[in-house]
Amino acid sequence: MTSMLITHSIGLGDYRIAPYPAHEEKWVIYGIGSCIGLILCDRLTRISAMAHIVLPEPAPGSVVEQPGKFAVTAVPFLLERMIRLGASPDHVYSQIAGGACMLRLNLADIGAKNIQSIRAALQEANIPIIAEDVGGNHGRTLHWDLRTGKAIISRIGMPDVTLTPPAYLFRKKH
């Protein structure tokens, strides 16, 4: 019997949360520039979360309708939802990608602010960053394989790079 691969694309401000899947499943965030692609994973239960973070924080006094859109809201929101599914905060780690400076205008460097904000939000939640590919001036695509625990970075004209350290890759469940 052939297993079917399910791929979900995560758009601006969107997120996904899921337990370890019974089938092959991958999540992908295409064309990350100044945004941040965030992966959270519980190393023991293999519960995963991913968000396409656009900005560091919402405007003061605004109502947040997309918690995955902002670094300061995405981390606590995703962690709380993962805990509901059975994750333990002590076993959750993160991987981040993005935060590039895509425009060389006299604008605030949103990419750098996103990097700073996601690092602060993760530190506040006591979630270690085990791998990152941030900064620079190039776009990336972030892939997350829920069955293997492997994050891969793709760039146009470059070979794919495994972001996840080998020690964090999942061993096969029996």
Image (spheres, rainbow, N blue to C red):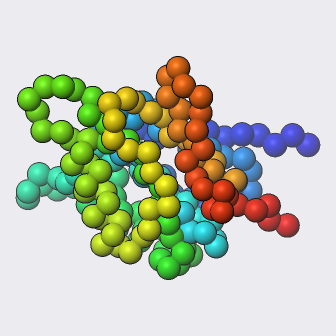
Q: Nearer the viewer, residue 16 or 152?
A: 152
In which quarter of the view is residue 2 placed? top right
* Residue for point 60% across, 44% down: 162
Inspect this view and state whether residue 40 appears.
no
Determine whether 167 is above or below 9 in the image: below
In the picture, measured across the screen, residue 148 lies left or right of residue 1, that is left
**Residue 41 vs residue 15: left or right?**
right
**In the depicted view, which residue is nearer to us: 70 or 140?**
140
Image quarter where the C terminus lies is bottom right
Q: Is residue 23 left or right of residue 134?
A: right
Residue 124 falls in which quadrant of the image?
Answer: bottom left
Residue 36 position within the rendered picture, expressed as x and y whole percent measured from the top left? 36, 45
Would you identify the image quadrant in which residue 42 lies? bottom right
Residue at point 30% right, 64% down? 121
Q: Position of residue 170 (x, y in %)?
A: 70, 60
- Residue farthest along the right direction in this orientation: 1
Say above or below: 135 vs 72.
above
Q: How many marks?
A: 0
Q: Residue at x 38, y 75 (%)?
A: 126
**Residue 29, percent from left and from top:** 47, 38
Residue at the location (27% across, 64% down)? 120
Q: Quadrant of the N terminus?
A: top right
The location of residue 11, given as percent across then percent down, is 41, 38
| Residue 47 visible in image | yes
Q: Nearer the viewer, residue 99 or 7?
A: 99
